[in-house]
Amino acid sequence: MYKELNPLFLSQLRLAVMSFLMVAREAEFNLLKEKTGATAGNLSVQIGKLQEAGYIEVEKTYKNNYPLTICRITSEGIAAFEAFYGDLKTYFDSEK
Amino acid sequence: MENIEKNLSPQESLRVIRETIDLAKHSFRENGFHFLLWGWLVVIASVAHYYLAEIQHAARPDMAWMIMVVVGVPVAFFYEWRRSKREKSENIVHNWYGLIWLGFGVSMVISIPMAVRNGLSPIPFILVLIGFATFMSGVLLRFTPLLIGAAVMWAGALWCMFLTPSQHLLIQAGCAVLGYLVPGYLLNAQSRSRHVQRT
């Protein structure tokens, strides 16, 4: 049962980013860094993996002449997270 | 965040999801601003309307409600504009909260002329609608004083059945104090204490 869980969500940082975006829908990179306590480098790598999977989209823009990176969860990301959460519940139900 | 590259167990996954979702929900700190703004305006307009109608016998006592348009709408828009500039993330709780009150606003705008055209006081209908929107806000924010505030609004609407339209104004002012201002100040105090804990 455990092996069937989506491996992309088995990293603590990726799961934290996805969980945050499930509520926030979109967030600035620096806010995600602050909330997860991750380093910028590690967060960039994990966000890249989520982006490659199509779970989030990244928009690079400017705010007051400073670069601004916004991460936004996609509908595929929401579906994947819900499926992962459903698999987790199934796992716990089967454990009972 | 420790052990970032380690594969999580199902128990750890569930803990991360719960902790992060809780953190994200608390990122949206509702400080009760709108409850305080609209609460005070409803109290002022209701009492002014009653005073102009019953004591001054003014020709258009209902003009007291212009304060909602002249003061309430611009202040609320300016506040939301500033908040949207400041926020570093969208928030689904915030979005739902806004949609509930948008739905209330539309329902109120429709119901007032319907009641007035049929020779009825619109206040009981407004109180029912405010009660519903306050109830949904209380559920969304998981804030019991708002649920109590909603019950006060609904009770006020029922009480109006036994009173004159002028007295409805005083009921509305009382409901605004108990259903808007009290939860508004409590939300404000909660938001400040959370802010202090985090800094």
Image: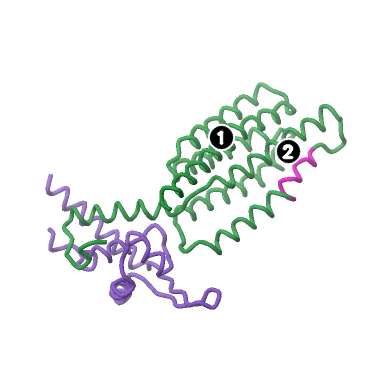
Chain colours: A purple, B green
A24 shown above or below A61: above
Instruction: Give the residue at x 46% y 44%.
Output: B193
- Which residue type carries mark 1? Val
Residue occupied by mark 2: B45
Residue in the foreground of this view, choosing between B132 and B29: B29
In screen coordinates, is B105 left or right of A93? right
- Residue A50 is situated, as x and y percent measured from the top left of the image, at 30, 72
Distance Cα–Cα, label 1 vs label 2:
18 Å
Q: Chain of mark 2?
A: B
In screen coordinates, is A44 left or right of A7? right
- Residue B80 is situated, as x and y percent measured from the top left of the image, at 59, 57
Quadrant assignment, res A20: bottom left
| Mark 1 residue element | helix
- Boundaries of the magenta span: B62-70
A73 is within the stretch colored magenta = no
B96 shown above or below B160: below
Quadrant assignment, res A88: bottom left
Which tag is nearer the camera, tag 1 or tag 2?
1
Query: Which circle marks residue A46 in the picture?
Result: none
- Residue B48 is situated, as x and y percent measured from the top left of the image, at 77, 35
How many numbered tags mark residues here? 2
